[in-house]
Amino acid sequence: MEHLQIASDNYVAFTFFIGTMAMMAASVFFFFELNNTAKAWRTSILVSGLITFIAAVHYYYMRGYNLETGDSPTFFRYVDWILTVPLMCVEFYLITKKAGAKVALLWKLIFASLVMLVTGYFGETIDRDNSVLWGVISGAAYFYIAYLVWFGEVAKLSQSAGPNVAKATRILAWFVLVGWAIYPLGYILGTPGGLFGMKLVADPAAASHAMDIVYNIADAINKIGFGLVIYALSRNEE
Ligand SMILES: *C/C=C(C)/C=C/C=C(C)/C=C/C1=C(C)CCCC1(C)C
């Protein structure tokens, strides 16, 4: 039986471990708080918990996969995202629902997020030679989501849903604009196309490590942070 040791400078493994633990702790928190949450807000808190729980399970796998192979668990990463990012869209829908958000808006957000993620997956895996092109398409879908939450339907509805929802939506919009922008940075570091041909990390192994570290940090900020904003909103609205 081989004993796997983690070198003290192995930040990839370190962030996978800490990511697993943080997502687990956040899930326990959101699930246990359901009982103390006003009825109208339970679904939103449940979705916060589902987002971190799905991530916890994927991080558990990604941690093991990375430890045993030393490779980047791209497949698990994208399965995680394809489940959790649409759930973040559901959060926007739920908090603006009382101001009249329609299911059509939810589908718009989900569709854009799927375009963003599927094209990103192509660029990272099956068509790495064209990673810049896929990254640009993915980026366009990302900007569309940012537009909807900053100026489009989500922003407008949140204004008529009361000051608490308006304020929370603005904070979540910052998460989308700044927190989500960390992901394309990871993509630029880790894919062969770099930043429109300019490679920031030359060595392929180092590039893939940098990408994993950046993604792991971004996930912790965005998934747990998003959930906490919703949690705070549920308390302010009581
Ligand atoms: C919990 C997971 C989240 C919030 C994941 C978000 C992922 C993105 C915003 C990814 C965006 C990308 C681009 C905008 C361009 C390059 C390819 C991606 C998929 C990394």
Image (cartoon, grey):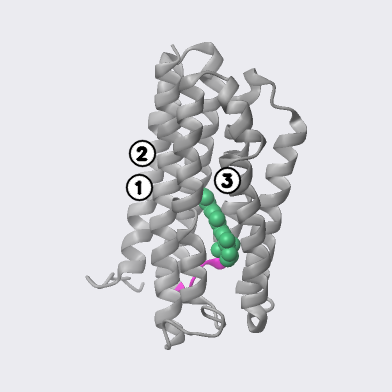
Residue 92 percent location from the top left of the image: 59, 33
Quadrant position of the N terminus in the picture:
bottom left
The residue positioned farthest toward the bottom in the image shown:
202
Decide: marks 1, 2 in contact (CB < 8 A)?
Answer: yes
Write down the residue under mark 3.
84
Write down the residue under mark 2.
25
Quadrant position of the C terminus in the picture:
top left
* Amino acid tagged 1: Met
Determine which of the numbered discs, if any, sits on residue 21 in the image.
1
Q: Quadrant of residue 167?
A: top left
Q: Assess disc 1: are there few (<14), some (14-19) or many (≥20) residues with their C-alpha within 10 Å of its C-alpha.
A: some
Q: How far is mark 1 from mark 2, CA to CA?
A: 6 Å
On whether ligand 1 comes within 8 Å of the CB at mark 3, the answer is yes
Q: Residue at x 35, y 74 (%)?
A: 2
Decide: marks 3, 1 in contact (CB < 8 A)?
Answer: no
The residue positioned farthest toward the left in the image shown:
8
Q: How far is mark 2 from mark 3, CA to CA?
A: 17 Å
Residue 23 percent location from the top left of the image: 41, 44
Q: Residue at x 67, y 75 (%)?
A: 133
Q: How far is mark 3 from mark 1, CA to CA?
A: 17 Å
Residue 30 percent location from the top left of the image: 43, 29
Q: Main secondary structure of the magenta part?
A: loop
Foreground mark, 2 or 3, reads 3
Q: Which residues are magenta?
A: 69-74
Relative placement, left or right, of 81 versus 134 is left
Say whether residue 152 is visible: yes
* Amino acid tagged 3: Thr
Q: Secondary structure at mark 3?
A: helix
On whether ligand 1 comes within 8 Å of the CB at mark 2, the answer is no
Among the two numbered marks 2 and 3 on one chain, the one whose residue lies closer to the N terminus: 2
